[in-house]
Image (cartoon, rainbow, N blue to C red):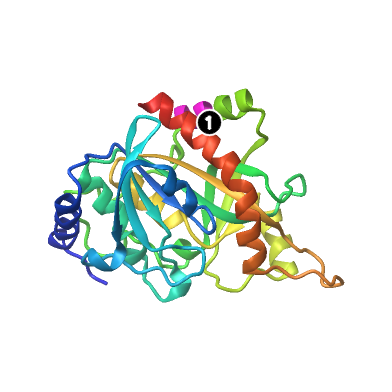
Amino acid sequence: MDYKRADYENAAAVIRQRSPLKPAVGLVLGSGLGTLAETLENRVVIPYDDIPGWPRSTVHGHSGQLVLGYLEGCAVVAQQGRAHFYEGYDAQQITFPIRVMKLLGVETVILTNAAGGLNPAYQVGDLMLLNDHINFVGMAGHNPLIGPNDESFGPRFIGMAQTYDRELRQLARQVAGDAGIRLHEGVYVCLAGPNFETPAEIRMLRVIGGDAVGMSTAHEVVVARHAGMRVMACSGITNVAIDSVDTELEATHEEVLDAGKMIVPRLAAILKGVLRALA
């Protein structure tokens, strides 16, 4: 999809018609984690179908609506579900919401996802704060910044060394520590999906330094950084990666959603603590 600036402006205009709120923070809520958006105060809910250009989510566990309101005194816009590469969307469609958020005034984006634990120290229900990522999809040529560059959003070339905001990570660690929540920190690997990884792929991803693996987030992070937004991201470990062929175990999406229910209270506590500080 070849979006023009007018496409993002049109979507932002529709959202402004439904809510006068000027959000400072954008939340992207992944598989099974969308219930957090239901805790917003003074909520305005907009189905994705009502927003021109906005990609529809077709995955179970992604509600497919935008929610604006207040969380811990902070004005936020929350994506209750996201689009994925494996649904047939291209990288620009997946990241369309991030640029619309930028036009709405968002300067900080907090992304969440459900991920498989590559690091043997991780258990189902754990949280991992992203300090870096390996974007296989982007490296293979599906990068949302490929094509003509819109200078009104950001520069042609961007550095990615300081992608995950250091101050926000420190804040998240402090909130987790005060709440007694175990919070790992590590490298997220983004793959295309929709199949889960083979045992050989899991072993390879560990060798190259991956701690968690999933099918989202990296594209949105690239576009957020291109637009000069601060980024924080957190993975909920919903399944432990299977690294052996001699096992009866198999990863399933139902397992991911079930684990999400356990993760939501912990993740909500961290996000609320961070938002409280930002407010």
Q: Quadrant of the C terminus?
A: top left
Q: Secondary structure at mark 1?
A: helix
Q: Is residue 258 left or right of residue 89?
A: right
| Number of residues whose C-alpha sits closer than 10 Å to that of mark 1, classed few (under 14), some (14–19) or many (20 or more) | many
Nearest the eye: 95 or 37: 37
Does the rendering let one see residue 140? Answer: yes
Location of residue 107 by image quarter: top left
Q: Is residue 173 left or right of residue 244?
A: left
Does the rendering let one see residue 210? Answer: no
Residue at position x 46%, y 30% in the image? 274
Residue at position x 72%, y 60% in the image? 241
Give percent across and percent down for residue 98.
31, 52
Magenta part of the protein: which range? 167-171
Q: Quadrant of the N terminus?
A: bottom left
The residue singled out by tag 1 in the image is: 172
Give percent across and percent down for residue 94.
36, 63
Residue 15, above or below 184: below
Location of residue 179 by image quarter: top right
Count of labels shown?
1
Give percent across and percent down for residue 231.
41, 40
Outermost right residue: 246
Residue at position x 35%, y 69% in the image? 56
Give percent across and percent down for residue 76.
33, 41
Residue at position x 65%, y 55% in the image? 259
Dominant SS in magenta: helix
